[in-house]
Amino acid sequence: MLTSKSFVKKTKRGAVIKIVREHYLRDDIWCGSELCELCQQESPILQREPHIDSVLCNFPHYILPDTNVLLHQIDILEDNIIKNVILLQTVQQEAKHRNLPVHKRTRDLVANKDKKFYVFTNEHHRATYSERKPGETANDYSDRLIRNAAKWYQDHLQQGKKPVSVVLLSNDKANRDKALEEGLLAYTVHDYVKSLTAKPELVDRLAQLANAEKDRKQKDSDISSDGGRKVLFPEHMSSTQLQTAIKTNKIKQGTFHASTENFREGFVSIHGEEQMIFIKGLANQNRAVNDDIVAIVILPKHQWTCPSSVVAVDNANKEEDAEKDLEEGDELSGTSQPENSRPTGKIVGIVKRNWRPYCGVLQPSNNTGGTRHLFMAAERKIPKIRIETRQAATLQGQRIIVGIDSWPRNSRYPLGHFVRQLGEIGDRDTENEVLLLEHDVPHLPFSEAVLSFLPSLPWGITQEDVAVREDLRHLDICSVDPPGCTDIDDALHCRNIDNGNLEVGVHIADVTHFIRPGNALDDEASSRGTTVYLVDKRIDMVPELLSSNLCSLRGKVERFAFSCIWEITQQAEIVNVRFTKSIICSRAAFTYEEAQLRIDDDSMQDNVTLGLRGLNRLAKILKKKRMDNGALVLASPEIRFSMDSETHDPIEVQQKEMRETNSMVEEFMLLANISVAKKIHDEFPQCACLRRHPTPSPSSYEPVIKAALAKGVELEVDSGHALAESLDKAELPAEPFFNKLLRMMTTRCMTQALYFSSGTLPYEDFFHYGLAAPIYTHFTSPIRRYSDILVHRALAVAIGADKSYPSLLDKQKVQSMCNQLNMRHRMAQYAGRASVALHTQIFFKNKIVDEDGFIIFVRKNAVQVFIPKFGFEGTLFLKGQNKEMDGLFKYNEEECTQIAGDVTLRGFDKVRVQISAETSNIQHQRLRLRLVEPKVPGFSVDPQPKSKDELDIQPPPTKKQKCTNSS
């Protein structure tokens, strides 16, 4: 033992505890090299004869990076050419504290056997550890530990028959100079990478830090506008100043959210405060990037303003000047303070950068032969990024990944570096890869470690299984799902019992039988969080052997289930409920349409059909009770693409048809979820995984209330019950689509439903606003949601069917998992919507179609139009984009209308628009809308062409397959 220190600490609850910290040193920690003859090591990692073709280091050597190289040049270290790397404990721990994503990527490198990354615990090795000297800074101490380890390695490895060198990589000049004085080989990572003759293009992946190269000319970071004025941002407060100001409440800390409609605007959400702070102008954004944690100052009230009603569209072929953009934004929103102004602030510092790799394209440039180019991210909220690359000619027309490195005060754009190439723009696989990466969806194939925990085949139910489960194979159970569904989570049954009541069962796939807590399969499922449904593919949460086979409740196959069985009166009153692990054999796997046909066909009187009729009758009663309690019936665009089986292109778009059987299944899934929520909360009041839907603030309904009033409809939003009643009454006989459109707009005003641990909130906050349920959870889809796996495990422990484990009973760990699941669920939804948008764009390629739509929002220069037939929303520009319409419409801000002569456009109005694919912006391809009706004096569009391209819309080829969008 080297040291032993003890001190007392007071906990948050006031208890005083004694903490003892001891530091031990060892002399038997091996170096990890195959050629070492001194260490007694079982499985060395570093190769015997490491060699990289390098002008600087044309001899066998190992690489030893310092902390900053690991943090900022992780893209270099991940390249296949970089192998045999000594990763010090000091470096790894500091990376973990400073950048968790980089730390996770480092762990993946260590786990990759081909990369040969060896973690050396230098702080517990007798020869490499040293205590901190009086007055020594933390950074100097860390550098000294790194040099100590490099020196030990250098001396240690020179004692063998085949000596090998150690090369220290550091961009810190002082650290390199001291290393050279101590006889070490030390280079900047830039010099080392430039010396690699086998891969010269790796230079493009070097991070561009603002102060990485002292000899960089000032013009490389100063961008001048046409008028010769430099665009400068205000200086950020230092970290020390930020901490002091935040503690004294002089400034506020929050998360920056850039606007998707206007790059000059953004918002900052502050934890615990309902209203977000509005940030107007690029100078006030002060180099913040979407999702950064920032510090803001609230401006004086007379400087408050509101978001502009202008929809701003970036032009890929124009390099905007930041000051000019700012002036235009101020002009468009008016110079006087608006009546509906809101708290407005400016960003004074960055608490934490949340930069990530971004997918996108290089902006077309006339800078032939130059190395400096602009990158446009696929995410509209991300600014353009300045990168240096010598591969511009090759990368044009390609989707690429770029990382941000820094954003100096005197640079209009952040500086970044090229990471890797994805594929051609427009290629389906490439575009799917982009949307999965942009939404952080884990989609790599399952690893061998994960697959090793799958059951071996052939698999079957044994007598031991029958002994510990309730045998329900005699029941007439069936499943009802969308067409093409292979991951069948749930099945149902209904039968009469002797006392005149009904027995109803919901049987859910018993996924937890196959996925045990804490193994690699469980870790992967929890990391993925949910199955992601794209238009043309599915990203499974668990391997296909489970999702589509052993867990799927397919027809006429025996399967394990977790059953929720009620005794229900003929009036749908619950008499009792019980839960049991079971064995079932589904009689059939129906689609919604097939089940509906059985119910409607009076000639069919078999037990399965009678059960479906009973379920359908009870479901109608249950739904009416929910509606009477204030549950909401909302709406969202639901479409289905018909896909060509050979090209996989969308050839037809259809609205999903909702039948009684859809509602039937939904009602019993809701009932099962509520019943299970009550059970697990009774058993585990502090750590049950539940789901709540927070009540939206009345102010969030203001846009839809205002739009409805313009149509003479008044919405009551004081409670869910009042809102439900007013939505039911909101009917306009002359406009049959009005009510559905109103419900869609109301849905957008809602807060998001969230998973949470029951011990972290009071019971009154458990309420699910949309369902009007006091308590709720997710139990019915464990194949595709990890939250349901947590609930299954808690329920199994509650009924004595399984054993507990520590993290299941830890409310903080459950809450941490819930936070992760909330993020994954949100990203899966966004990815699904992005997939629909992608295929809609593909569908309209080379097509021009006239179609009816409805105005959702009226803006200063445009109107947002929803097209019911195709289930998408587009922007009809009235100024700036359609030059022939410029000056025809005038915006009435008070009434929120656009007026041209006797034509007035307002919310909910029906219009007819011409839809075509706009491809001039290679990054943000969109659908172009042009107004057909009502006819505006002085403007008309060309008639819809009668071409083969148009005719292709109607008659789909004979070879096709249906794919369901489940976003």
Image: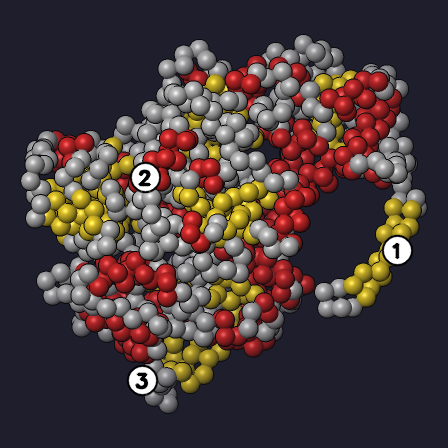
Q: Nearer the viewer, residue 364 or 888?
A: 888
Tag on residue 226?
none
Within 10 Å of disc 1 (Cα), the crowding (few <14, some 14-19, many 20+) is: few
Q: Residue at x 31, y 74 (%)?
A: 722
**Marks 1, 2: nearer the viewer:** 2
Image location of residue 545, percent across then percent down: 48, 49
User: Which amino acid, by three-letter code, is at mark 2?
Assistant: Glu
User: Which amino acid, by three-letter code, is at mark 1?
Assistant: Ser
Q: Secondary structure at mark 3?
A: loop
Q: Secondary structure at mark 2?
A: helix
Mark 3 → mark 1, Cα distance in angstroms: 68 Å
Tag on residue 571?
3
**Marks 3, 2: nearer the viewer:** 2
Q: Nearer the viewer, residue 254 or 890?
A: 890
> Mark 3 vs mark 2: which is more N-terminal?
2
User: Which amino acid, by three-letter code, is at mark 3?
Assistant: Gln
Count of residue discs:
3
> Mark 1 vs mark 2: which is more N-terminal?
1
Q: Secondary structure at mark 1?
A: strand
Image location of residue 591, percent across then percent down: 29, 59
Where is mark 2, residue-wise? 331
Rendering quarter of residue 127: top right
**Marks 3, 1: nearer the viewer:** 1
Image location of residue 552, percent across then percent down: 43, 57
Image: 30 above or below 487? above
Tag on residue 6?
1
Q: Residue at x 7, y 43 (%)?
A: 935
Within 10 Å of disc 2 (Cα), the crowding (few <14, some 14-19, many 20+) is: few
